[in-house]
Amino acid sequence: MLNKKMRELLAAIEAKRKEARTFQDADDSEKAAAALDEIDELQKQYEVEKRLFDAEQAAFDEKDFTPETHKDKKDGFETIVKILHGKSLNETEKALVTGGASGENNLMPEDVDLTIRELRKSYNSAKDLVTVIPTDTMSGGFNFEKGTPSGLTNLTDGDDIDTTGGPEFERKSFAVKLYSKLIPVSKVLGKAEKAGLLTYINKWFVKNAIITENQKIFAALKDGITPITYLTFDQLKTAAQTGLDTSVWYDGVIATNQSGYNHLSLLKSEDGKYLMQPLITEPTKKGIDINGTIVPVKVYDNKFLPNVGGKAPIFFGSTKAGCYMIELGSTEFNSDDSYLFGKNQKALMILEGFDVIGADKDAYNYGLLDIKTYDVTFTVKIGTTAQADIVIECNGLTGTTDVDGKAVLKLTNGVFNYTAKGATIKDFAGKANVAGANVPVAVAATAAE
């Protein structure tokens, strides 16, 4: 949560960052450095304001919390334990569980539902990529605008007003499907069961739910799109900056798997700096400059989002506008005392329902990032004489030439600066262009003086 002052400071930091980039691009390093110093000062103000805001919120929460309310507050996990042990619930506990203690299809108490949501955040859930819409119906639909507005037309007084180019809509339907998992619960659990049950839900329900949800979300994001293969970072960035409307970057993201993230994180500019930059609001996370905005890069496990033909899948743009997850209001549980009788366990069945549908497919793109490495063979010669023991440095990699004057480095697609240095030659600098194949690079050196 941000207050007005924090939002103003973040806006000022972003404006100063763009100003510093403008100065640097104009070769005015002095003004760029001054702008960066101002960013540092604004960042300090933001951190102080954030700490003060958090302290004020904590003070408010403490003031609103009294020992009496804590004493009377009922815990949803304790309520579930009583149900599992066949104990009766008092009126306060019954209010937590719709359907009562002895009936089927009991709804998850609110605090347990909230705990599950928090647990999800500690795993690699793709729900952050999409718009989640709660529902209490099993089917329905949404209307989405089609096409692009063409603007107003010139009107001459007395002529008919243009009626073409009106809004068009497309109906997208959803049908909630149910997904469940059985969790064995020991009958000999003591009063400290709260932690134990939390562990069960953590390990069984949350992990299994995320696996299923991620599969459906990524399938929906890919549905109907023929992916383009991007050989170089320049191709990818051009597609992001010119192939999508600038408005999608208001909440835009770049999402890929571990292989794709590793590839992007190792890319460097000509001056040797990494292309991925820390986010202003979350310095521990990285982003890429798209149309002047640092867009966050989200990474998902290869097991959830596997490579396709040796290439890394990548989504960029507003995936929240492009995909909706319709989620049935509340997680449910049922318990059975006889199913696992021979194991001295109760069976706890956790159930949730959802559907994932495509929405505005023009708001994002899906492609494949070529992450393959190719052999780049540097051959250093003075005239026709091969030079051994020459050190080649390129994109953070180093190699030393052999008696034939050759050194091989493995590089991805792109244009890379390299240097060649050694006792027998003058320092040499050049570029290696890798475009989907192994590349020979001839280094025409001159003798050292």
Image (tube, rainbow, N blue to C red):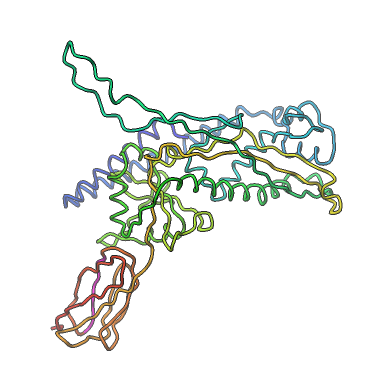
Which stretch appears magenta?
416-423
Image point (85%, 46%), residue name: 338
- Left or right, 197 with reference to 11: right
Residue in the foreground of this view, choosing between 55 and 325:
325
Q: Where is residue 181 in the image (x, y as percent from the top left)?
A: 69, 47
Image point (22%, 48%), residue name: 32
Instruction: Identify the image quadrant of residue 382.
Output: bottom left
Image point (32%, 42%), residue name: 244
- Left or right, 258 with reference to 235: right
Q: Does the magenta stretch include residue 421?
A: yes
The relative height of residue 122 versus residue 54 in the rendered view (above or below) is: below
Task: Quarter of the image for the C terminus: give it.
Answer: bottom left
State the count of labels: 0
Image point (19%, 47%), residue name: 23
- Left or right, 414 with reference to 96: left
What secondary structure do most residues of the magenta stretch adopt? strand
Residue extending farthest top: 158
Q: Position of residue 408 (x, y in %)?
A: 32, 77
Residue in the foreground of this view, choosing between 356 and 413:
356
Q: Does the magenta stretch include residue 167?
A: no
Residue in the foreground of this view, choosing between 65 and 126:
126
Q: Position of residue 299 (x, y in %)?
A: 46, 53
Q: Where is residue 95 in the image (x, y as percent from the top left)?
A: 73, 27
Instruction: Identify the image quadrant of residue 135.
Output: top right
The relative height of residue 11 versus residue 203 in the rendered view (above or below) is: above
